[in-house]
Image (spheres, coloured by chain):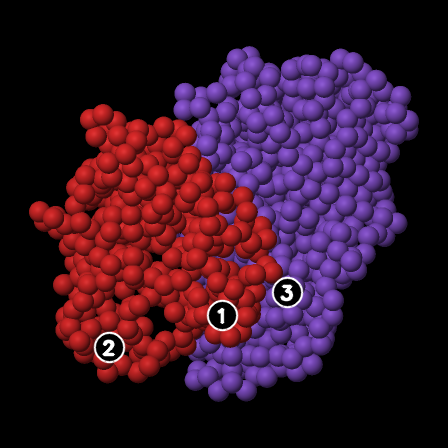
Amino acid sequence: MRPFAYAAPGSVDDAVAVLRDAVPGTKILAGGTTLYDLMKLGVEAPPAVVDVLRLPELAGITVTDSELVFGAGVRMADVSDHPVVRADYPALAESIWRAASQQLRNMATLGGNLLQRTRCGYFRGTDFACNKRNPGSGCAAIEGHDRHHALLGASSLCSATYAGDFAIALRAFDAVVDVVGPRGERPIALADLHVEPGEDPSREHVLDVDELIVRIRVPLTPAGRGSTYLKIRDRESYAFALASAAVGLVIDGQGVVTESRIALGGVATRPWRAVEAEQSLLGQPLTAESARRAGEIAFADARPGRTNRFRIELGIRTVADAVRTAGERAVR
Amino acid sequence: MRVDAYEKVTGKALYGADRVLPGMAFAALALARTGRGRLISVDTSAAAAVPGVLAVETHFDLASPGFVMGGGFGFQSLQPMTDDHIAYRGQPIAIVVAETPVAATEAAEAITAEYEDEPTALHLDSEGATTLVQEEAIPLPFLADLKVGDADAVIDASPVTIEGTYEHPPQHAVPMELNGGVVHWDGDTLIVHEGTQNANALRFGLAQQLGIDAANIEVRSPYVGGGFGQKNSLLVHIGPLALVSKRLGRPVKLVLARTQTFHNGSFRPASRQRIRLGADETGKITAAVHEVDQQTSRHDLFPAMHTETSARLYGLSAYRGRQRLVQTDVQTPGYMRAPFESPSMFAFEQVVDELAYKVGRDPVELRLANDTDTDPISGLPFSTRYVADCLRRGAELFGWSGRNPEPRSMRADDGSLIGWGVAIGNYPCNTAATNATLTAGEDGRVTVAVDGHEMGQGIRSTIALHVAQDLGIPVGDVVVQVGDTTVGTQHLTAGSWGTASALPSVHSGLRELRKHLDVADTGDVEVAPAVAAVGHAVTVHADSVGPGQPADALAQSMTGHLAITGPEYPGFVTFSWIAHFVEVRVEPTTCRIRVPRVVSVADCGRVASPVTAASQVRGGVIWGIGAALREESMVDDRFGGFVNSTLEEYPVMVNADVHSIDVDFIDKPDYRYNPVGVKGLGEVSMVGAAAAVANAVHHATGRRHYRLPIRIEHVI
């Protein structure tokens, strides 16, 4: 790890000012659970960090008439313990408490978590070629261990998986992040926050270097109650998803699905919404067959690598199970 | 009861690298980034320019420590940074010392090197891997292939035969305590604070490497944060650290990064086990053939001992073992809890399970029918063997009689397939020569300095409990000193012989102490008044050797060498035994495999310390589940080394994976083996656990798995 300059501005305005004038390569530091880790590995070497962890404007969870509002500095552990989130948006709560470990959740913030970088071992090991870490150097994963790599949204340059969980649930609920920069505040739909690797795997999101996420807003929806986040992994804690699915459903008095939300995690290069799979469930009763069919549609375009083909079938089944669980919660 | 629980939970217990000494500097290693080859040049200029850097060294005048299993002291014979040969990825090429750990790490990362690459062989089947027949390559009696009768002919003539080939991946122990420590010089005396299971080998190994007298070296390892075999010998960083410390005239601390511990310490090598069994129509086993290929390094032959246990499991009339070593481009592999026995039983006990299905007999009943009192290899009786009792008690505690033997026949309410599996395991009871010094003080406290190391297994508690019970004094009045070469020899503590070797010399020391205190041979002792009557503190020495072990073993132990005997003793053979009963549940859709409950019943002789013993068994079972379902050290053929070298990517079990593990003991003393009746426990705890999981997965799914780990992709 290289020495770096450290600044801890007292307000969002100050933080933006510091970022505007910062030396190139300056990074925003929140909980530090990813950034410090990558700095120790030599993957990140920022000359300076701007600590936003204690900014008062980034704190707090509020419920309005139309939205759930999370400050970007809220610790992950506080979301999974929040009574309204637990009762009315189980998918949000579950996506958090199934992420990382309790120790990490006590430290990590929501804003930082959204921009968590991939866990590809070749990205994290500086000995290897990686187009994301070192553009143009190639990709060691293509001919290497790709058991955890993306089935959806990959390019010929990079198939590193987006590793987070919370963003998957947010994607299902059409969340919006509010971003502040020198040019003021702007909302970005979570759907537009992350980008696929395409020709430039080093670019993972649309934020400018001097922009800061200040809050995350989730529109209220009855599909929140009928929701779940199912995460399948190699062990029951402290592991990234082999496949995950956030599903929210509304089912009417006749048992017909009237609202359907499905997002996929652990299988794509960015938080992935399975729109056609959602539509396949609408206007009809939920059955084991329709749940399975939704999974098959969600993975219709999946492209496996050398060793991760099993995760297509696993992903289909994960969606099917999550749809069934959401259906049970939705029916009253 | 754990006597050091308070120290551990409050952070007062000082592990090797916890020492903070005045003027201490910090070291970091730079590692080779090629799988094998020749080092052409190392560029240290950027490293030397990092502020705070005190020294950057790429070459050391150090002799080889010798391989611990080849008469030496090191985990491998190869000492890095002594020539231009790179034997494996991750081999150290430079060491940096700086005023802070941050500067040292930054400088180490700034070191670059040029290599002349050579092709690597990393797997048992790799082109360029060299396969050797072990008994020819290492012509020592205890490594000769085990043979009784004509096993192949007996199997060919048997009405029932079963055959299977099983693959076991390389694995790493990843103990919580990282390798590393603090070294400093006090005049001409080198003092090493390092978590180790073998302080005396560090002492004599460093003496050999540095060309100094072992009398001028002290090694202190009062606590080890998990050894599991990786800390059983001298590691490659300590010699360079000692020289750099001398040159700088300052204490130097080095803690390896987690990824570095995957390459600068031993690991469980890959192995392939081919088993053939012959049996009659009732499942009575007639003969077995067990052939093993085990990975080793190019520079050392790590001896395979997989057949030692499989040969003793059942009453066989004929047996043939054959072990081969496959040389690959890795650091030398070594001992990791139940190093051979867990892979060996994973294979053997699955074949036995297959046999039960083939002859239509209950797997517990079939194992009971193959029990024996006699060791098939030597023809000698087992001193004690209560594995049948383990099976019977385990079956009852588990509710085995409720099992429908038909695979895929049992389901939970949520639709999960339920599988119940059983397997047994054994582990040889070796014994080490040990010394003990007991002192009764005027304050009534008894200090016991004994050969042994506290790796978390609880040897300090066990010894304190033994002394307290013998003298009738509070446990708190017993002070146990282990792992310190200034108070005892500190022979290697491993192979489950620690407690069974240390307790006899403590026991003998207690008899001696009673004599010197002029009190009765048995019964409670009022220590302080007895010391007062003598007029001064009383110190006695005692030692012990294994049954039939020559007394010169003590002298051998004092030179840092292995001084063990067993499991074949004059007139008898001693093994510890265990039976594991495992329930798995395989989810109906996503096929996650979970292990909701395990019952394990062990025969370890008398249970010397109930709390720490049960904890040992739980740990062994947890590791067995991890071996069965999760752990594998991954190799990328293009690069060498191990790529999943972090706690995150190397999937050790987490608490959320662990559910009910009921542990019980037969608790019958083995006084033929030693005067305290105690057999080994730590290693046998794990033996057979992975097999029981695999047998349960077969019962749940109808599919048998010939390769570990069994992951979701193998059952979906």
Q: Residues within 10 Å of mark 1 (few under 14, many from 20)?
A: many
Residue B3 vs residue B630, the one in the foreground: B630
- Which chain is red in the rendering? A
Subunit under mark 1? A
The structure residue drawn at horizontal position 16% and vertical position 53%, both measured from the top left corner, is A69
Residue B35 vs residue B409, the one in the foreground: B409
- Which residue in the structure is indicated by mark 3? B639
Q: CA distance from mark 1 to mark 3?
A: 18 Å
Instruction: State the residue lying farthest toward the front.
Output: A283
- Which chain is purple in the rendering? B
1 and 2 marks on the same chain: yes
Residue type at tag 2 = Leu
Determine whether the residue tagged by mark 1 lies in a helix, strand or loop: loop
Of the numbered discs in the image, which one, if any, rests on residue A131? 1
Determine whether the residue tagged by mark 2 lies in a helix, strand or loop: helix
Q: Nearer the viewer, mark 1 or mark 3?
A: 1
Residue type at tag 3 = Phe
Of the numbered discs in the image, which one, if any, rests on residue A19? 2
The structure residue drawn at horizontal position 52% and vertical position 13%, both measured from the top left corner, is B402
The structure residue drawn at horizontal position 77% and vertical position 30%, both measured from the top left corner, is B163
Of the numbered discs in the image, which one, if any, rests on residue A290? none
Q: CA distance from mark 2 to mark 3?
A: 40 Å
Q: Position of residue B237 (x, y in %)?
A: 60, 67
**Residue A224 position (above or below residue A159):** above
Residue type at tag 1 = Asn
